[in-house]
Image (tube, grey):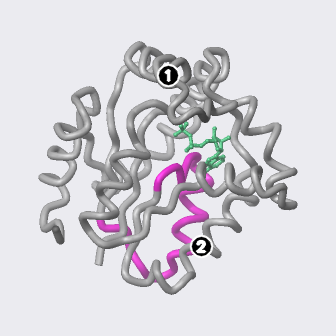
Amino acid sequence: MMRIVLFGPPGAGKGTQAQRIAAAYGIPHISTGDMLRQAVAAKSELGRQVEEILERGHLVPDEMIGRVIAERIAEPDAAAGFLLDGFPRTVPQVAILQRALGEKRLDRVVMLVVPDAVVEARILGRAQAGEGGAVRADDRIETIRERLRVYREQTEPGAQVYREQGLLAEVDGTGNIDQVFGLVAGLLGGARA
Ligand code: ADP
């Protein structure tokens, strides 16, 4: 049983690490970014509401994403734990998550620490390489800077709440995928595989 939250700026390699952690611990990887992009692709009601917000690199309203996440963590596969990637992203979302968890507690909050210059270089590389042909609409340089600004301004204060609770562990995210995963696994301990 593991309930983990993963923080990190855009381009920190959060999605990649999240998949590896989820596989190693046998828990679902819940990415709000992926869920919102799927909603946009499916042209659902939610997708239509968030499409423009995503393209600008802004955050969708807390209550809206709060409903999405509350429903998701209530699903049976999340009963044995989960890894949250991209949520919570603001101080109010930290409270929304706590309410959705009820009596349950998070086990660990991990933050991948990567300087802005490294993040910008990585995302530009990803946009140019076109990652499997799919260039994300929010991977343009202006949008990256906006997402970084939003991360520093709104998401880091959310992480601070967990730091004060003694739940937050910071990991150097500048190494390669295996190195960073090694650090995270060492921290979490007891991987299943
Ligand atoms: P990143 O590459 O910045 O980690 P994500 O894939 O996690 O991006 O999210 C992409 C976009 O989806 C964000 O820029 C934001 O518009 C929206 N989003 C994802 N999660 C949240 C959230 N918890 N609250 C508000 N907006 C969110």
Classed neighbour count for the residue bearing mark 1: other residues with Cα under 10 Å, few (<14), some (14–19), many (≥20): few
Residue type, mark 2 in image: Arg
Above or below, 60 relative to 113: below
Above or below, 92 relative to 146: below
- In the rendered structure, the answer to whether residue 18 lies left or right of residue 99 reads left
Residue of label 1:
129
Residue 8 among magenta residues: no
Above or below, 77 relative to 4: below
Viewer-nearest residue: 169 or 144: 144
Residue displayed at 69% across by 41% down? 59
Secondary structure found at label 2: helix
Residue of label 2:
72
Magenta residues, start to end: 85-107
Residue 186 percent coordinates (x, y): 12, 52
Residue 153 percent coordinates (x, y): 57, 30
Picture quarter with ligand 1: top right
